[in-house]
Image: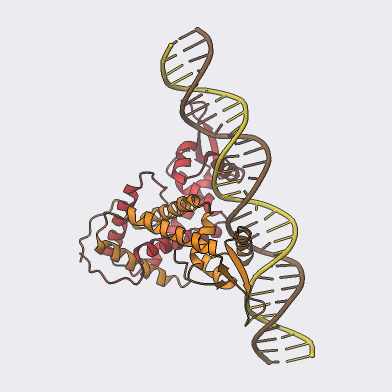
Chain colours: A red, B orange, C yellow, D brown
Amino acid sequence: MVTTKEPTLSFTSALVRLAHLVQQVFGEVSREHDLTPQQAQLLCLLVGGPVGMGELSRALHLEKSSLTGLVDRAAKRGLVRRTRSSHDRRACLIELTGEGQRMGELAHEGVAARLETLAGDLPAGHRDLLASAVETLLSRHTAGPPRA
Amino acid sequence: MVTTKEPTLSFTSALVRLAHLVQQVFGEVSREHDLTPQQAQLLCLLVGGPVGMGELSRALHLEKSSLTGLVDRAAKRGLVRRTRSSHDRRACLIELTGEGQRMGELAHEGVAARLETLAGDLPAGHRDLLASAVETLLSRHTAGPPRA
DNA sequence: GAAAGTAGTTCGTTTTACGAACTTTTGTCA
DNA sequence: TGACAAAAGTTCGTAAAACGAACTACTTTC
């Protein structure tokens, strides 16, 4: 149970500005580790285990051809590796290299830490409410963007 | 006064996924109006009146040279116009053309409408709390990202 | 009035992102 | 079985986005 105070920002403006803030945090953390934000996002998505191009494409909302390029560059940097699926010889699974795993974890932790710091003042009740409100929004938007 | 339910998503994950969602909405709306997301963002930022390059650069978190390119392309499409400042002959103000104003308003309304729809279920108390929580986060991050 | 700083631009580079056309493999169904 | 549609990725060409370094043109400061 928490009390509500009157916001000076409209609901939608708040969402947009929040998105901007998160993006910026992601950018800062990526740069610290010498990654592009897109690469960091890719690595974060892969720390849970190998994922196929199709699923990555859906998770990142990228066209297949865009994703091919992103994976190519990440592979050239030794962060990621393509494995041919055994069930379906067209498909491939993208998996992290040791270096990629390390970087992915660093990026993930960096973002989480930065956001935790920014949320320092926020009472736990507010955090939970915010998180569950976001869940509601996401549930209405069938496609599932990536974790991070 | 609102009751809090237990979220299944961590606080930071919720923020990241929310950012992704907002970005996606922005992308969809931009595409509908045949704008790039960056152009739409620029137009939204200018609907309040002309702004100088320096301030735009800070608001959008772009290097000066990146912004020059963005404004160039928007100007080439007839959405925006450069005006030399009378006080400082180095500086310029970027202002919307009639077409730019129209598109900026459409984009802004489109994004707001989409987000409102997604938030349909959300009780007003939750919205207000979310908005004021965002204000708290923003206030800790001195630089002020753009409205939209 | 010279030096230092500020506002923007230019240039070259890399990354991102798209769509259309393509190859290979898988599934379907007649 | 064998043709044919569909699916998974890649390739190619293109445009936009973003950066940093070096530059020009004004202002401010001392």
Which residue does the image show at 60% across and 45% down from the upper left? A73
Which residue does the image show at 55% across and 69% down from the upper left? B56
Q: Where does residue B16 sit, x and y in percent of width and height?
A: 41, 55
State the residue lying farthest toward the front: B98
Q: Where does residue A2 sit, x and y in percent of width and height?
A: 22, 66
Q: Nearer the viewer, residue A107 or B21?
A: B21
Q: Nearer the viewer, residue B54 or B114?
A: B114
Res. B55 image quadrant: bottom right
Q: How many marks can you see? A: 0
Q: Work out whether A56 lies above or below A119.
A: above
Res. B10 visible in picture: no
Quarter of the rendering occupied by the N terminus of chain B? bottom left
Q: Work out whether A115 lies above or below B32.
A: below
Relative placement, left or right, of D23 versus D8 is right
Q: Nearer the viewer, residue A60 or B50?
A: B50
Quarter of the rendering occupied by the C terminus of chain B? bottom left
Res. A6 image quadrant: bottom left
Q: Where does residue B46 sit, x and y in percent of width and height?
A: 51, 67
Res. A90 visible in picture: yes
Q: Nearer the viewer, residue A78 or A139?
A: A139
Which residue does the image show at 41% across and 52% down from the upper left? B21
Relative placement, left or right, of A20 versus B75 is left
Q: Where does residue C26 sit, x and y in percent of width and height?
A: 47, 22
